[in-house]
Amino acid sequence: MLHRHLSFYVVMLCILSACAQPQTQCPTPGPDQPLPEITGPLKSHTEVRPPIIGVVLGGGGARGFAHVGVLRVLEREKIPIQLIVGTSVGSLIGAMYAAEPNAFELEWKAYRIEDSDVFDFSLFSVKTGPVKGEAIQNYVRQNIKSKNIEDFKIPYIAIATDLNTGALVEFGRGSIVDAVRASVSIPGVFTPIRIGDKTYVDGGVVANLAVDVARNRQADIVIAVNINENVINYHVNDVVTIILQSISIMMEKLAQNELRKADAVITPDIGNVSTLDFSQKKRCIEEGIKATEKSLEAIKKAVVTYYLRQGANAPPEYANN
């Protein structure tokens, strides 16, 4: 029996490793490129459609508390977010904010999240994954008032993976409970969720930072939040922590190609926070704040670049930075 369970974990890790291959890179501007040279007079920014700014939130378990700090700074700086794309824990934090864009409220809820709200381990579900997934479903029901994604105040996409075909799946409509449950279902840890005739696991298997999805949803500027940089864990001593650390490492490698496609990348310094360590919420949020403040210049530069390419001056709040 034990050998059969371990074989399942090994197979899932092999699938993840196979997925971590380079993808085709889109010819999108990077944050280090110089501003475009424009000859002739520029139009007013009021004559140009404002850019659609998308925020892509990656997975990483407890490191996802950093997303709270990121959103807090973006809100404080009045960076208008018109799209949120989230994978795994990024789908949870992203849904909470997209449904009710209030950073203070989000932070208050985040501090109250415990590991038992996400990871409900059970010996009875160990055949398909030791975490049942009912706890995260209950948490979403109780803490997100809008039950359907189309009712959110900010357009939102949760990323999951079709376990049978390996296809990337975008949840942009329907039940938010199902969408988050599918997106956070770490293979080998969570029991996969079946919705209709499909079985889903964590979106991080195919796109932990779904920059391409944001582009395809018409985002002109994409801000990617990577919480899997330099992941370090010296307390890997059981099957679950081995799987989680291995997945974190593979997600870090898989994300590199996507990060090159973003206009601004925010990377909180939290690589040594393990996936299950919910005791470092405050530090993760603070590091999210610090990393976002460091990235503000790149974000505002991306906005200026957008307007220049439309032959217009940027709004003064961006142009004067």
Image (cartoon, helix red, strand yellow):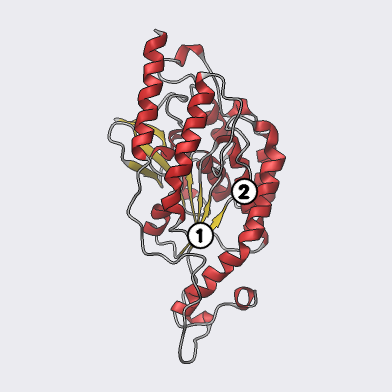
Q: Position of residue 30 (x, y in %)?
A: 47, 64
Of labels 1 and 2, the one closer to you: 2
Q: Residue at x 54, y 42 (%)?
A: 228
Residue 16 makes an appearance in the image = yes
Q: Residue at x 37, y 27 (%)?
A: 12
**Residue nearer the viewer, 269 or 119:** 269
Q: Secondary structure at mark 1?
A: loop
Vertical order, 7 against 15 (above or below)? above
On-image quarter of the C terminus: bottom right
Vertical order, 13 against 39 (above or below)? above
What is the crowding at mark 2: few (fewer than 14 residues within 10 Å), some, or many (at least 20)?
many
Vertical order, 279 against 85 (above or below)? above
Relative horizontal placement of residue 207, taking residue 229 as reference (left or right):
left
Disc 1 target residue: 82
What is the crowding at mark 1: few (fewer than 14 residues within 10 Å), some, or many (at least 20)?
some
Residue 194 makes an appearance in the image = no
Q: Which mark is residue 102?
A: none
Disc 2 target residue: 268
Q: CA distance from mark 1 to mark 2?
A: 22 Å
Q: Earlier in the sequence, mark 1 or mark 2?
A: 1
Relative horizontal placement of residue 16, taking residue 153 as reference (left or right):
left
Q: Amino acid at mark 2?
A: Pro
Q: Amino acid at mark 1?
A: Gln
Q: Residue at x 50, y 76 (%)?
A: 35
On-image quarter of the N terminus: top left
Q: Are marks 1 and 2 in contact (CB under 8 Å)?
A: no
Tag count: 2
